[in-house]
Image (cartoon, rainbow, N blue to C red):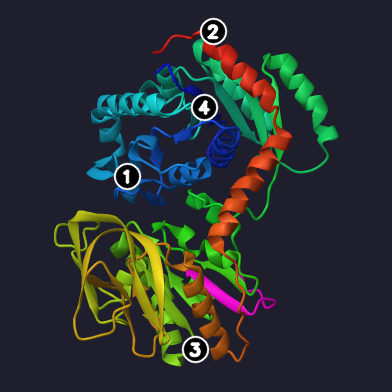
Amino acid sequence: MAKALKLMFQGTNSDVGKSVVVTAFCRIFAQNGYKTVPFKSQNMALNSYITEDGKEIGRAQGVQAEAAGIQATTDMNPILIKPNRDNQSQIVVHGKPYKNMEASAYRKEFFQTGIELIKESLAVLSEKYERIVIEGAGSPAEINLNDREMVNMRVARMADAPVILIGDIEKGGVFASLVGTLQLMEPEDRARVIGVIINKFRGDIRLLEPGLMWFEEYTGKPVLGVIPYLQNLNIDAEDSVILNQYTSVQNTEKELDIAVVQYPKISNFTDVDPFFAEPDCHVRFITRADQLHNPDLVILPGTKNTIEDLLFLRKSGISEKIVELQKKNQTVLFGVCGGYQMLGEKIEDPLAIESLHQEIEGLDLLPIRTTITKDKTTVLSNGLLSLYGKHFNVSGYEIHMGETKKTRESNGLIETQGRSDGCKTSDERIIGTYFHGIFHNDEFRKELLNQIRQTKGLAPIDQRVSFNQLREEAFDLLADHVRAHVKLDLIEQKMKEFKKRGLHNE
């Protein structure tokens, strides 16, 4: 693994902004003319990304590949962990389901297999690329887990990569968390840390400077950057932790109210991201029936466990409120993937793949039935969507373990690759599809919103945002922002010094 120059980002804890910083450096290195690739050995996430060859990886690595201007492959994330029940997860290896495992069994039985997978992927990427930007997970100071971890310092040793440690100042105690993390590292690992970055800073940098000077003197590690908080960045989030920042409250200043149901096993919630960029839309995530009110559009998003999340809808009373809204004929209801399955008459899981409940009644709003199967569909899809008397060329991706069949003659939504996907009612106010990313199709999204506006007596909006253009602009904005607030020349120097120093692989 001698060809590529590597740089790894680790954090003092989860949600410090590692994924975003890695995305920024993928863009920066690519802008600087280096053939750059992201890497995360093991990712635990319910938001996933489909590669060109129909494989599933963590969404963050797919987005980071886009930022680097390359096609995503499974070598960028060879192990994906998708929680599907309490204490149990689906293990995805090189984009395909391996098996369902409990955490203890995974640590005991999968460890050596995982190590070999990681080594192989690092070797492949190192031969193909000039720069590898590696992302860790959680904290490298998880003392109880470090004997068999395979995502932080063990990966840094395998790749012989220098490490930048990220601390989140927004959480408070950033110096304590940075110093504590460094002190809990083994001396060899501490030597790999070439410096730290303080992320999500707000305020006057002059007030922070005494702390920065103290930190450098106390630890001997340079502060390589203080990155101010950057709001309204149109780049996909991966971790559902981010959903905590969204409101469930209506905003009467916005003309259109969009309610997204946030069930416990919500997945690929980035499907709704384009609505955040629309000036007339207010998007909110709801977890209780009393938060629903009378939205213009209700979205049932994807889920890693359709049956368990459907039970949540019933227990919370949200399902009853949704049915009431449909009787009033005032709200458009749109289900995506698992949300689409919930809209049907029944869901069956005879092999107990997702749940111990082998059969459950759906919301009975679309004439479909779904059977959960062992085989998983992961594919990039495109087709012709028909709605409101118009036709739209759309693209998206499918990730599901269910087969859905119509129980009677009804209207399909998308003609795709010789088959029909989705279903809609005759009045086109209840719609379902397996296509993740359906709302990223600008012309379709524009028509959907304008139809809702027309129902409310509002004039249509002819010029709406191009979400793909916004994403490209967001990558450049992020790269410019990080460039302006980190010591990039010093980072480059330390990366090269580290390589010359030749710390040995594990």
- Disc 3 is placed on an element classified as loop
Residue 281, position as x, y percentages in the image: 60, 73
Residue 353 visible in this rendered orientation of the protein: no
- Does the stretch in magenta take in 251? yes
Mark 4–mark 3 Cα distance, whole angstroms, equals 51 Å
Residues shaded magenta: 248-260
Q: Which mark is residue 87?
A: 1
Tell me which residue sits at (81%, 28%) in the image. 209
Give the Cα separation between the discs numbered 2 and 4.
16 Å
How far apart marks 3 and 1 lie (CA) works out to: 40 Å
Expressed as whole percent of the image width and height from the top left, the position of residue 51 reads: 35, 48
For the residues bearing labels 1 and 2, Cβ distance under 8 angstroms: no
From this viewpoint, is residue 187 visible? Answer: yes
- Is 265 placed left or right of 68 in the picture? left
Category of crowding for the residue at label 1, using alpha-carbon neighbours closer than 10 angstroms: few (below 14), some (14–19), many (at least 20): few
Q: Which mark is residue 501?
A: 2
Kind of residue indicated by mark 3? Gln
Q: Amino acid at mark 4?
A: Met
Task: State the CA–CA distance, disc 4 to disc 1.
Answer: 29 Å
On the image, numbered disc 4 is attached to which residue?
8
